Image: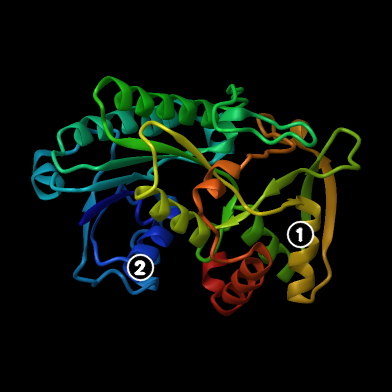
Amino acid sequence: MKIMITGGCGFVGHHVVEHLLKNTNWDIYVIDKLSYSSYGYNRIRDIKAFDNKRIRFFSNDLVNPISEGIFKETSDVNYIIHLAAETHVDRSIIDPMQFVYANVVGTCNLLNFARQCKDLTSFCMFSTDEVFGPASRNKAFKENDGYNCTNPYAASKAGAEQLALSYMNTYDLPGFVVHCMNIFGERQHSEKFIPMCIKKILSSEEISIHGDKTKTRSGSRFYIHARNVADAILFLLSHFKQREIYNVVGEKEISNLDLAIMVASIIKKKIYYKIVDFHSSRPGHDLRYALDGSKLKELGWVPPISFDQSIVKVIDWTLKNPRWLN
């Protein structure tokens, strides 16, 4: 079997590559534009996959249609996992058009490529919980709940997701959509919350925790390790139903303040923090996100590693590999 992973040099992508190398004998095509968040091939080299004969790398920005040369080399693919995307909310607020091109136009170009792949059995469109907008207390969004995008990043992903679903309907493209949220793990960019906490706690810097307007309640998320995400995707490639959507969710909710305190406790250093009004400090951000993951669990998927195991493992690894905090 042959599988294509777009964004395979990125944070989630390289974890998917690593998981496939360990759990399949498939050949892997990686397409990546090698942006700032990809760190070049550094992640791929770090997992000792760069020289693996099962992997072939293609540098391509999906804003442009896939070239004839790359098409000839990769159109025998059986699976496509579309992870390539611009994902930083703050950057989307500064330059929304960049996100429209990367996430909507880029997805459309890949879908047009996928339509021509005669051996394709599944197209996995990777999307985000942020398409639903903020979740009220005790609310967890199901897969087909209405969308309420509150920032340009979320809107661009909703557009990309709907394009994929339309191709699955109009052209009978085999595939499904995945919603995921707050992925963490080794080699994550230091702008993300957990590595940012590690970095600031180590240097005794103050951490800004986003809260409500009263500054008494911090935001909360369901965090999930990238390995669990990779495992869920591999599971769905053989269990999905055509044009269905699946939420991939961490097993428990944790507030950002409790998480920061947990990180400090594991590192065994004092934490300095302040709670700030999240919307005034970062317009377009939401206090709470939540997804209902029961649909995937009912199919039989069980996450291989718990959150508590994951967070200890990631912190220990990061302390031993501090270059990834720079």
Is 61 left or right of 286, judged from the image as shown? left
**Quarter location, residue 244:** top left
Q: Can residue 203 be seen at all in this image of the molecule?
A: no
Residue at image coords 78%, 48%: 209
Residue at image coords 35%, 71%: 22
Mark 1 Cα within 10 Å, few/some/many (few <14, many 20+)? Answer: many
Q: Nearer the viewer, mark 2 or mark 1?
A: 2
Q: Is residue 201 above or below residue 254?
A: below
Q: Quadrant of the C terminus?
A: bottom right
The alpha-carbon separation of the residues under discs 2 and 1 comes to 33 Å
Can you give x and y, in whole percent of width and height, for residue 35 in the image? 38, 49
**Quarter location, residue 213:** top right
Instruction: Identify which amino acid the numbered label 2 is placed on.
Output: Asn
**Tag 2's secondary structure?**
helix
- Comparing 291 with 82, the one in front is 291
Instruction: Identify which amino acid the numbered label 1 is placed on.
Output: Ala
Tag 2 near tag 1, CB within 8 Å: no
- Comparing 7 with 174, the one in front is 174
Which residue is at the far bottom? 320
Instruction: Look at mark 1 in the image and give the residue it sits on.
Output: 260
Instruction: Look at mark 2 in the image and give the residue it sits on.
Output: 23
Lower sequence index among marks 2 and 1: 2
Residue at image coords 20%, 57%: 1
Can you give x and y, in whole percent of width and height, for residue 282 in the image? 70, 35
Is 314 left or right of 253, judged from the image as shown? left
Can you give x and y, in whole percent of width and height, for residue 146 in the image? 59, 21
Q: Is residue 134 above or below residue 259?
A: above
Figure coloring: rainbow
Mark 2 Cα within 10 Å, few/some/many (few <14, many 20+)? Answer: few
